[in-house]
Image (spheres, rainbow, N blue to C red):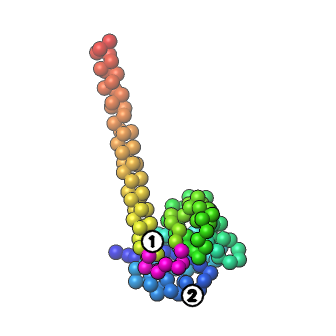
């Protein structure tokens, strides 16, 4: 089984280095250090999840990148990773479509567990959509037959 593909977007090179050391065993990792390169990476190559810093320094912010991803209808889970734990920032990220928000301060193992949880959530949503499409397809075949049965029953009763 192949490793989940994760894009890690952060302008903090030390954080990138630490996460790469922890995560390379579990994930196929690619990094970006600014919002524009993150958007290019996602457009060029599908990822299973994105870890995105709120404050990317110059250029687009993490919230800007997240907003653009959601406008493009990309359903990839995005976990915001930041040292900024102010409630207004967390609320803004969640409202913009973040799957989760985690501080850079906890150990990176917690971040790995959060990524795995987000990936499971996406897998369930994909499965549910597939089941819904299957049910709708079955209903579209059965509906005309049911309608005919109702008409026949009405004709007999009438």
Residues at marks 2 and 1, CA–CA distance in whole angstroms: 20 Å
Q: Is residue 48 left or right of residue 138?
A: right
Q: State which quadrant residue 2 falls in.
A: bottom left
Name the residue nearer the viewer: 87 or 141.
87
x, y percent for residue 142: 33, 36
- Mark carried by residue 54: none
- Residue at image position (49%, 83%) is 19
**According to the image, label 1 marks what residue?**
115
- Residue at image position (66%, 71%) is 61
- Residue at image position (71%, 77%) is 58
Name the residue nearer the viewer: 96 or 4.
96
Within-10-Å neighbours for mark 2: few <14, some 14–19, many 20+? few
* Extreme-top residue of the structure: 158
Say if 151 sits above or below 80 in the image.
above
Q: Which residues are magenta?
A: 103-110
For marks 2 and 1 on the same chain, the one whose residue lies earlier in the sequence: 2
Q: Is residue 105 magenta?
A: yes
**According to the image, label 2 marks what residue?**
14
């Amino acid at each position: 089984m192949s490793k989940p593909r994760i894009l890690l977007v952060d302008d903090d090179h030390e954080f990138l280095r630490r996460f790469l050391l922890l995560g390379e065993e579990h994930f196929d990792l690619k990094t970006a250090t600014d919002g524009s390169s993150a958007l290019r990476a996602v457009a060029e190559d599908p990822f299973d999840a994105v870890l995105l810093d709120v404050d990317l320094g110059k250029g687009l912010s993490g919230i800007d990148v997240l907003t653009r991803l959601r406008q493009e209808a990309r359903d990839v889970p995005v976990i915001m990773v930041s040292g900024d734990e102010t409630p207004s920032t967390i609320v803004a990220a969640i409202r913009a479509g973040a799957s989760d928000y985690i501080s850079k301060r906890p150990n990176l193992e917690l971040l790995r567990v959060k990524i795995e949880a987000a990936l499971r959530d996406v897998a369930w949503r994909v499965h549910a959509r597939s089941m819904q499409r299957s049910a709708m397809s079955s209903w579209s075949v059965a509906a005309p037959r049911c309608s005919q049965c109702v008409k026949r029953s009405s004709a007999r009763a009438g």
